């Protein structure tokens, strides 16, 4: 893993690059992440989320540099929202051999001219990257009906899209910091984010979701949690009670 420099990209595990960018959060003076992750197996590579269109140049620069001449093989929008899928058409054009993967049932309606470049998958299916099979994971704390998570069995990184967004007093110079390198996330800020990003946490106590999340984490035993909207989490066992509190209804 690379040391933190203050700005993205950052190599967070062998073959896994964290890129994207940050923008002003709804809380004054704070920045929010809009991350995506490049995972390179021995034979094939996958970009997990497309990045936000505002960060297209940075994402392209970082992905091209990391691939070092290799093609990008797969693009995995975790769900059909702008920060996660808004650059799909651009990347399919930039890498003409790449295939879009994910829950893509609606995408032939958005990009009908690219239907032959889409592979619809469901949770439990795997993708052969050469030295590993990337696993598509049914989400627990999900956003939309088409949300999918992913798990790399080699680095043991769980990619979970909008979930476990590790909000902290994030200022310029902390954009590539891991959860263990910044102050603990603030529950009130996570509740505010989750109520806006996922919507349903404002209506439920989420008890079933907590149990399902415990079971998933016990089964996969991840080393890190890679969320699109917060610090990459390298100490999730310490953070999990805070994430659960962040999913509870705000007082
Ligand atoms: Fe979302
Ligand atoms: Fe999101």
Image (cartoon, helix red, strand yellow):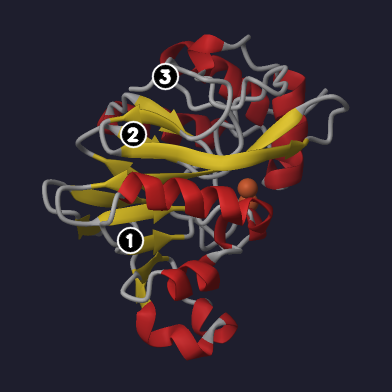
Quadrant for the C terminus in the image: top right
For the point 61% across and 64% down, the residue is 86
231 and 208: which is toward the camera: 231
User: Which label was assigned to residue 157?
Assistant: 2
Q: Distance between the residues labelled 1 and 3?
A: 26 Å
Question: Of the numbered discs in the image, which one, if any, rests on residue 116?
Answer: none
Between 37 and 151, the residue placed more toward the observer is 37
Q: Residue at the spot x=38%, y=47% of the render?
A: 65
Q: Which of 47 and 197 is in front in this view?
A: 47
What is the number of the mark on residue 234?
3
x then y, percent, for residue 11: 38, 31
Camera-side mark, 1 or 3: 1
Decide if residue 54 is in sight here: yes
The residue under label 1 is: 72
In the rendered structure, which disc, 2 or 1, sits on the residue that comes first in sequence? 1
Mark nearest the camera among 2 and 1 is: 1
């Amino acid at each position: 893993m690379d040391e933190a420099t203050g700005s993205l990209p950052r190599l967070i595990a062998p073959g896994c690059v964290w890129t994207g960018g940050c923008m002003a959060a709804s809380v004054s003076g704070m920045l929010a992440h809009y991350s995506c992750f490049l995972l390179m197996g021995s034979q094939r590579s996958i970009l997990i989320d497309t990045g936000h269109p505002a960060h297209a140049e940075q994402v392209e620069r970082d992905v091209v540099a990391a691939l070092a001449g290799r093609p990008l093989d797969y693009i995995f929008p975790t769900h059909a929202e702008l920060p996660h899928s808004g650059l799909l058409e651009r990347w399919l054009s930039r890498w003409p051999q790449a295939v879009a993967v994910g829950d893509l049932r609606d995408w032939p309606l958005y990009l009908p001219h690219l239907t032959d470049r889409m592979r619809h998958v469901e949770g439990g299916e795997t993708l052969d990257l050469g030295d590993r099979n990337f696993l598509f994971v049914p989400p627990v704390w999900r956003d939309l009906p088409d949300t999918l998570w992913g798990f790399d069995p080699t680095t043991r990184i769980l990619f979970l899209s909008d979930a476990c967004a590790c909000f902290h007093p994030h200022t310029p110079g902390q954009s590539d910091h891991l959860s263990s390198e910044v102050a603990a996330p603030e529950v009130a800020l996570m509740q505010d984010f989750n109520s806006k990003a996922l919507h349903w946490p404002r209506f439920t106590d989420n008890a079933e979701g907590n149990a399902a999340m415990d079971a998933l984490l016990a089964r996969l035993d991840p080393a890190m949690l890679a969320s699109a909207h917060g610090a990459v989490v390298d100490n999730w066992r310490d953070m999990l009670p805070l994430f659960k509190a962040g999913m509870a209804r705000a007082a």
